[in-house]
Image (cartoon, rainbow, N blue to C red):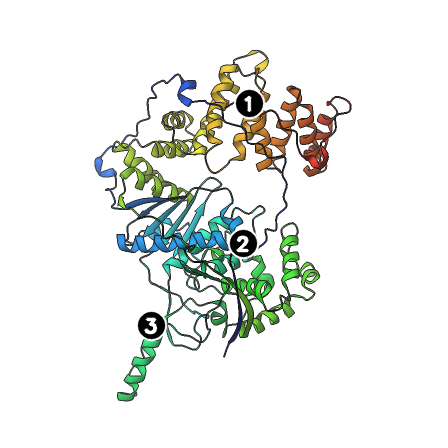
Amino acid sequence: MAATIQDHTFMNAPMLFRRFTLGLTLASFLPSLYAVDIAAVTGDAVVTLPVYTVTDARDLPPPEAWRHTEIPGFEIISNASDRATKGLLRDFDLFNQAVGIVWPALIGRSPTPVTIILCGRGGKFGAFVPKNADAGPQQGMASLFLRNPERATIVVDLQTKELNLTGLDIGLNGVENNGAIEVDSYKQLYREYVRSLLVRSTPRMAAWLEEGLTQLLMDMQVSPTLIEFGKLEDPNTVSISQANAATLNALGSADDPTAVALTAAAEDRGFNAALARSGLMPLAEMFAVTHDSAVARNSIGSKWSKQATAFVHMCLYQTGQRYQKGFVAFITRSAREPVIEPMFKDCFGIGYKDMLLEVRGYIEFTNYKSLGWSSKKGEGLSAGGPLVLRDATESEVGRIKGEALLLAGHADPARAALITPYTRGERDPRLLAALGLYEREAGNADRAKKFLEAATAAKVVRPLAYLELARLRSEAALAAPGAPEGKFSPAQTAGIVAPLFIARLQPPPMPELYELIGDTYARSLDKPKPDVLGMLFEGVDLNPKRLKLVYLAAQLCINTGEFQGAADLIEHGLRYAPAGPAQTRFADLKATLPPGTVATPKTKAATPAPAKS
């Protein structure tokens, strides 16, 4: 029988984690934005939008009934009941606040817009499952996290309450089960949300570490006045459904010893219960799982997920913190070198086999210290304002579903979802931006440009739309330069950078826009004003390892006489550029500086004068 000893510590504002990343920054410089309007560059011209030909109205799928709402950072559609949707989102709001308390740096990272799709009826969830994402009967899936560098979508299956898993070997805890495992939709939403935050780490955490931290966070106990983190449930408890089945079986067997026993679904338990009667996988196998593998995507009933959580919990919270120092060293080194047993042993002092025995002992006798936060009187987590749900427009449904399907790799259904509302007359700027980006990805530059011109003229909030419009204009200028020697004319330059200045203020920050600003001025008759140089310094500060951007910014500083800023940028480039051609380019650029120009101590870059408001 598994046992647990817990020492619970409460704090007013606990910091539970330390970010294991290098702080590589230049001086922070945030100049004001040029007051540039897209319409001013286009001459406020009327944009003629493309036409999609539909031979028969029956080719268009019928409208779907979804509900829509927005909360800060999230746009949501749901076809579950309003009551179920509001209940889930109210709890999610409290959970989000709790994450901000126990790990404020995680919430504070640069935001990526997230859409949430809650599938409550009609079997809608399956359409979003990526191809080859199913790991087979051994593992289950009731939620998805789909992403690219610009956007993310969370899809949660609220319809499925149990998953049938063949050969389930965790979570049984000696209790008869029917081969199924219960699904907690709330925790599945929490899991995918935490993954959407952790994925922003640079470099990205290993899959096992990401999963272990995700499981710890999604299992937080949260109320308006109390947060408990790292606390484990009693491994010897059983679910209500299993207890009811046992009671009925006891009553039934008393009357009829030959009666068939009732069974219930197993719970998706914490690691100390789930692994109590299950063998462990070799550590080398656990560390080798990749982010895009089916094993990492499907956590319900997953031995890998539970074992990763056990290892992380032991290293962080075991009484006496015996392995915490080695754990920090292991994470730091594994971010920059292959994970092999000699490196592991160098960090922990023991090899894989001995550490696996330690994990097994910890599962059986979990002696640990958890952390908690309790509010002062009147300072608890806020309940938030009333959540307003309304019928989603065809444009919203088509755009959100279409882009999620694209992220899942389902191109044809995605196209149908996107063009259907447009064909029926919808002209929402966010839909136009999505269509423009879809056509751009499909290689249809003319159609893409028309959609993107219309969307950006309507001031859509979608930085990639502005970036791709600027790229299209840059490609046109490269094909037909408006100035001698293949240079861009002032009008061409203004047309390219205007949408980039707007995109710069929209989340998420995109390093490519800073590079295109630098590349455009490098090809232009115009010299960048201090405002523009300030933007490039900002870009380097946000993306210190984008060496192309560092080089362009240094080159433009030299061209405009900002030699001190150039020296600081060149020194930064020499520090981080790999040996070979990259180092040589920065060294050659350094040789063009006036004699006596040296970098500022500690490479704090001299920034140009701020732009005028």
Please tell me which residue lies in front, 547 or 373: 373
Q: Nearer the viewer, residue 263 or 571?
A: 571
Most distant residue in the left direction: 57
Q: Are marks 1 and 2 in contact (CB under 8 Å)?
A: no
How dense is the environment of label 1, judged by Cα within 10 Å: few (below 14), some, or many (20 and up)? many
Residue type (three-letter) at the residue carrying disc 2: Thr
Distance between mark 2 and mark 3 Cα atoms = 35 Å
Give the structural element (helix, strand or loop) at label 3. helix
The answer to which of 179 and 274 lies nearer the viewer is 274
Which residue carries the number 1 mark?
Answer: 520
Q: Which residue is mark 3?
A: 241
Residue 437, position in %: x, y? 41, 33
Residue type for callout 3: Ser
Q: Quadrant of residue 463?
A: top left
Name the residue beneath numbered marker 2. 290
Q: Position of residue 514 (x, y in %)?
A: 55, 30
Query: Marks 3 and 1, how far apart in space?
Result: 65 Å
Q: How many marks?
A: 3
Q: Residues within 10 Å of mark 3 (few under 14, many from 20)?
A: some
Image x and y of residue 95, in percent? 42, 55
Spatial distance from mark 1 to mark 2, Cα to Cα? 38 Å
